[in-house]
Image (cartoon, rainbow, N blue to C red):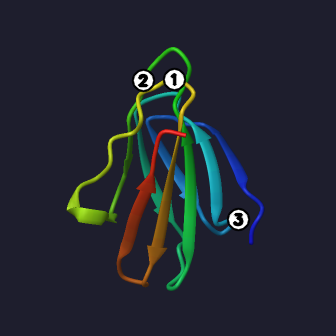
């Protein structure tokens, strides 16, 4: 296990450096494109994204192959969480998600 790292509030372009942890939490503060960096082959990574209060923002992840071939839509409800899980095989990043906590 790994201690979850708080990424804080997002910007429009947010890079997640998995050298420091394999679990991150973020609060959307803008429509955000996430870039995933320093993933290791065989690694499992989790990103927990909270929708901001008062505004509905989007979350997009670059270079991810999603379950069913379709990227998820971030839950729009204020203060709700979506949990994204990524597995790297060294070439591809496979993504899955559970939503609306």
Query: Which label is found at residue 91?
Result: none
Query: Which label is found at residue 56?
Result: 2
Q: First in sequence: mark 1 or mark 3?
A: 3
Q: Quadrant of the N terminus?
A: bottom right
* Image: 2 above or below 54: below
Residue wearing tag 1: 78
Judged from the image, the secondary structure of the residue bearing numbered disc 2 is loop
Mark 2 Cα shell of 10 Å, populated few (<14), some (14-19), many (≥20): some
Asked if marks 1 and 2 touch (Cβ < 8 Å), the reply is yes
Q: Tell me the distance, in whole angstroms, between the alpha carbons under discs 3 and 2.
A: 29 Å
Q: Tell me the distance, in whole angstroms, between the alpha carbons under discs 1 and 2.
A: 7 Å
Q: First in sequence: mark 3 or mark 2?
A: 3
Judged from the image, the secondary structure of the residue bearing numbered disc 3 is loop
* Image: 3 above or below 11: below
Rendered residue at 57%/49% (across/down): 48
Rendered residue at 57%/27% (across/down): 79
Rendered residue at 69%/65% (across/down): 21
């Amino acid at each position: 296990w790994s201690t979850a790292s708080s990424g804080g509030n997002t910007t429009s372009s947010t890079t997640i450096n998995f050298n420091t942890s394999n679990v991150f939490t973020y609060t959307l503060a803008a429509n955000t494109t996430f870039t995933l960096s320093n993933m290791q082959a065989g690694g499992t990574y989790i990103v927990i994204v909270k929708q901001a209060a008062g505004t509905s923002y989007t979350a997009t992840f670059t270079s991810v192959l999603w379950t069913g071939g379709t990227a998820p839509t971030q839950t729009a409800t204020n203060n709700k969480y979506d949990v994204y899980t990524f597995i790297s095989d060294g070439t591809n990043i496979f993504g899955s998600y559970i939503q609306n906590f």
